[in-house]
Image (spheres, grey):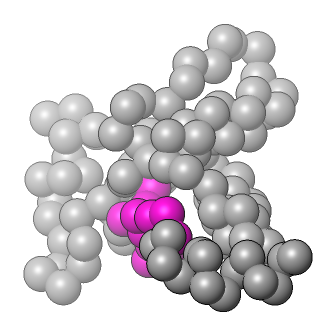
Amino acid sequence: MDRASQVPARGLAPDVPRTYAALSDSGNELAQSQQYLTLQEEKALVKFILLMSNLGHPVRIKFMRQLAFNVARHRSTNKPIKPPGINWPRAFEKRHPELKAKRVRAMDWKRHDSHIYDKVT
């Protein structure tokens, strides 16, 4: 069995989530090397996303792939870097429980007319 297959075959405790991050934390560097971003890059991206959300400009999930690609492009490697896969943002969200996707909806027109309009004018 090759080294890449040994990591998932070894198994984890029942209470540990089955993610690359959990496999990496269990002591194998192979799983961490398969992640798109390094641990420091992921921490920086989480910090940026939380900052933008606190400032009132939440980052949409469809833009997270582009952000990750921009972070990865700034690495000093000789080989070309591909953008992350289509499912990467959801997996990133699962790895970081402090991030939570929310559906943003428009304000109700009744509320808009009575409260906001008077304050603005």
Q: Along the horizontal axis of the image, is 88 left or right of 45?
A: left
> Can you tell which quarter of the image residue 73 is in?
top right
| Residue ID at (71%, 62%) | 57
| Residue 105 percent location from the top left of the image | 45, 64
- Rendered view: 53 above or below 13: above
| Residue ID at (63%, 50%) | 38
Of 14 and 5, which appears nearest the observer? 14
> Can you tell which quarter of the image residue 95 is in?
bottom left
Q: Quadrant of the C terminus?
A: bottom right
- Rendered view: 13 above or below 75: below
Of 91 and 30, which appears nearest the observer? 91
Asked whether the viewer can see residue 92, the reply is yes
Of 114 and 36, which appears nearest the observer? 114
Q: Along the horizontal axis of the image, is 100 left or right of 76?
A: left
94 inside magenta stretch:
yes
| Residue ID at (18%, 85%) | 15
Q: Along the horizontal axis of the image, is 24 left or right of 66?
A: left
Q: What is the span of residues highlighted in magenta in the rendered image?
A: 92-107
| Residue 39 percent location from the top left of the image | 62, 59
Q: Along the horizontal axis of the image, is 12 left or right of 34?
A: left
Asked whether the viewer can see residue 33, the reply is no
Q: Quadrant of the N terminus?
A: top left
> Can you tell which quarter of the image residue 103 is in?
bottom left
| Residue 116 percent location from the top left of the image | 70, 80
- Rendered view: 100 above or below 119: above
Q: How many marks?
A: 0
